[in-house]
Image (tube, rainbow, N blue to C red):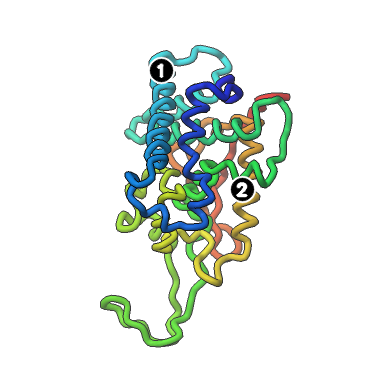
Amino acid sequence: MQTVSDPNSCYAIQYKEAFSIVRDPFVYLFPAYTRLPSRLIPYRNRARKANENLRQLLQDIINKKKESPSTKSNPDLLSLMIMATNHDKTGKVYLTDGELVSNIAVFFEVLSVLGDDPEDIIPTDKELKQMDYLNNCIKETMRVNPPTSGNLPRVASKDTQIGNVFVPKGTMINLELYSAHHMDKYWDLPEVFNPDRFNTDNPSYREKAIWMPFGYGPRTCIGLNFSMYEQKVLMAMFLKKYTWKLVPNSEHEHGLKNATGGGIGLLGPESLRITLTKRYP
């Protein structure tokens, strides 16, 4: 990963430029700022252009790998992921090019922050805050495969009219979370894995209250922040130290299968077995 350690490499330059807007504290202090036309904020155009260039660079790497497949007995991580893009007899795709780009981008981000030295590192809070794309990937994963079938129910405190539906006072209301996370009314191409939909300059999912793996509002899950922090720490450490792949003939080859677990409608993958390979001793 020489491109990670070389700050002057085209990948490193495009990466820093692409994520400059994500790390702008002004965006967090004044979210409405993101609604201003891009022409009024030149550096936003530069950041978006850099993001497009970075994704194109990664796509070019993927295309070159596909044109010259690895014949090594121990192929690298990208070669293994490309193998997963093969089509089966039913025409289903294991892993799309878009998902490949996302996987490479988040791997690149973790190594750019933690380095590629062969040693275990527990990321600090400061380092975790730099891993914006990893944060986006976690959120998108919970959108595509929510950790629960539905949030805790609410009770109507008064008679309410919602469109053509009358909801009497005292009615218990629940939300089917998977459907809410896959409605094309609220999500662009909902079946496509796209972490970029959670960029800080795209606040629509917060304004519309449509991403709710932890619930929403003043009674949201008390473990939200802890869960997100824990996931980022574990994923960063796993990405740095291991490559992983599904075991042969896995039932998850064509998409994650969830089984109802314990607790309040919690969902968990069904017999998900993964082979981990160390990147260093």
Quadrant occupied by the N terminus: top right
**Residue 231: image tag:** 2
Q: Nearer the viewer, residue 23 or 103?
A: 23
Q: Nearer the viewer, residue 109 or 7?
A: 7
The residue type indicated by label 1 comes to Lys
Q: Residue at x 44, y 32 (%)?
A: 101
Q: Is residue 22 visible?
A: yes
**In the rendered structure, are the residues bearing label 2 and label 1 in contact, judged by CB atoms less than 8 Å apart?**
no
* Image coordinates for residue 117, horizontal then vertical, percent: 69, 25
Residue to which mark 1 is pinned? 64
**Residue 49: image tag:** none
| Residue 91, image quadrant | top left
* Image coordinates for residue 85, horizontal then vertical, percent: 41, 29
The residue type indicated by label 2 comes to Gln
- The local secondary structure at tag 2 comes to helix
Q: Is residue 94 visible?
A: no
Q: Report the side of 6 relative to 257 (left or right).
A: right
Q: Nearer the viewer, residue 122 or 203?
A: 203
* Image coordinates for residue 217, horizontal then vertical, percent: 51, 69
What is the distance, in whole Å, between disc 2 and disc 1 at their CAs?
A: 32 Å
Q: Report the side of 20 relative to 239 (left or right).
A: left
Q: Residue at x 72, y 35 (%)?
A: 121
